[in-house]
Image (spheres, coloured by chain):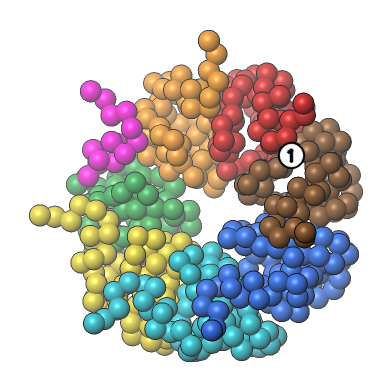
Chain colours: A brown, B red, C blue, D orange, E cyan, F green, G yellow
Amino acid sequence: MEASRPLDALNEARGKRVVVDLKNSKQYVGKLKAFDIHINVVLDDAEERADGEIKRKIGTVFVRGDTITVISPE
Amino acid sequence: MEASRPLDALNEARGKRVVVDLKNSKQYVGKLKAFDIHINVVLDDAEERADGEIKRKIGTVFVRGDTITVISPE
Amino acid sequence: MEASRPLDALNEARGKRVVVDLKNSKQYVGKLKAFDIHINVVLDDAEERADGEIKRKIGTVFVRGDTITVISPE
Amino acid sequence: MEASRPLDALNEARGKRVVVDLKNSKQYVGKLKAFDIHINVVLDDAEERADGEIKRKIGTVFVRGDTITVISPE
Amino acid sequence: MEASRPLDALNEARGKRVVVDLKNSKQYVGKLKAFDIHINVVLDDAEERADGEIKRKIGTVFVRGDTITVISPE
Amino acid sequence: MEASRPLDALNEARGKRVVVDLKNSKQYVGKLKAFDIHINVVLDDAEERADGEIKRKIGTVFVRGDTITVISPE
Amino acid sequence: MEASRPLDALNEARGKRVVVDLKNSKQYVGKLKAFDIHINVVLDDAEERADGEIKRKIGTVFVRGDTITVISPE
């Protein structure tokens, strides 16, 4: 009954707030709305953070998969 | 009824002004005219920004997908 | 009877605690829950380390494969 | 009647002068002669610029797609 | 009778100790247990070295292929 | 009658001297002998240049495509 | 009768001593034993050089293709 594929874990996080870390050290925090096999991700009610501080509120944001390092719950 | 794939979110943004962030820290802001599955993007009425300042007005611009980090509403 | 393919070694590590090293020098340590052929990985009970110190406890974390350098037992 | 795919926009620029920006911050300016789906590009009557200055006149130049960030009208 | 493909050379090294050099300048030294066409590699009885010094003993280690530069006998 | 695909332009340059610029800022100058769709290139009577100076004469050289930024006539 | 594809040039170099330049500025010099379409390469009687100096003698070495910039005769 456990999720055994990585994308299952993302699927369980759908609709919940997640932190998306990028290779350039920025973070995008928001509600996980959508993702695909390239790990392209869309967040709602999102904000950009750098060095732990909120840089801008950006509503919906599309994050290109190949720029992502990790995704974790907020 | 909600968009459940990342490209649906881009499709909803078509015709609206978006901010495209690049890996080299530049931003291109303009009206989203076209995109494809590689996230190649075309913006109309576009301008290039660096460090928050407008660097040049460039009309239509083609942005290669693999240089993009995030796309968000202006 | 020995594992002869690299993914067999990951399969044997499933359910055990592993250290995942990233290209950006961060480490994620946790119980290996899932992986796929892209080496996308999901860890449970995970924590992020940098320079040997725990930076944050993050529960479940999805690590994108192309950002990983090595995976080893804790 | 509008171009709805990114390569359509490049097609409309064929025969016109464009600026091709590279990841290494160089610019190649010339008449767009040819391109393909990898965004490999050929310019005629081209020149290389760095920091806004003309570095060399190079006639025809082949630019490899994966080194390009944006293409815009001159 | 000579190996004429690169993976044949890796196959001959199976079970022997090898040095795996990474793009980030780290070295992993151990007994070559497994590899695949992506050059993902598993080493047994492995240790991590940096600047010629042993940094940690790590038993079995999975090294992602795209982070590898060269593999040579110890 | 005009070349309309980027590789046509390379084909026209076959047998002529070209300058191949690399991502690491080196240049290889020689007679274009062969190329393929990955833009792997072979030059004859070639020399390596760095900062505009000849570093070594190297006869025939194979240049891996993904390291190339631009190819232009000498 | 001339070699017209880049891999033909590598094939002609088989059994001869070549210099393999890497993106990280290291050089591997040895007898070209094997290569494949990814430009993965195996050298015999090889040595590693950095800044023109021999760093280590390494017998047989496997060099991963995507780390290579150019291959030339010694």
Question: Which residue is drawn at the image coordinates 66% and 86% (left, top)?
Answer: E59
The quarter of the picture where the N terminus of chain F appears is: top left
Quarter location, residue E27: bottom right
Q: Does the image show residue F63?
A: yes
- The percent coordinates of residue C48 (x first, y second) are 81, 66
Q: Foreground: B35 or D49?
A: B35
Question: How many numbered discs?
Answer: 1
Above/below status of A36 relative to C63: above
Circle 1 crowding by C-alpha within 10 Å: few under 14, some 14–19, many from 20: many
The residue indicated by pointer 1 is A34
Quarter location, residue E49: bottom right
| Amino acid type at image mark 1 | Ala
Question: Which residue is drawn at the image coordinates 79% and 33% (left, top)?
Answer: A60
* Residue E68 lies in the magenta stretch: no
Q: Foreground: E58 or F7?
A: E58
Above/below status of G14 relative to A26: below
Q: Foreground: E61 or F31?
A: E61
* Residue F8 lies in the magenta stretch: yes
Question: Which residue is drawn at the image coordinates 55% and 20% (left, top)?
Answer: D4
Which segment did they paint magenta? Answer: F1-14
- The percent coordinates of residue F70 (x first, y second) are 41, 45
- The percent coordinates of residue A33 (x first, y second) are 78, 38
Q: Does the image show residue E25?
A: no
* The residue positioned farthest toward the left in the image shown: G1
- The percent coordinates of residue F15 (x first, y second) are 19, 47
Q: To which chain does the residue with label 1 belong? A: A
* The residue positioned farthest toward the front in the image shown: A1
Q: Foreground: E30 or D59?
A: E30
Question: Which residue is drawn at the image coordinates 53% and 10% (left, top)?
Answer: D1
Q: Is residue F45 left or right of residue C61?
A: left
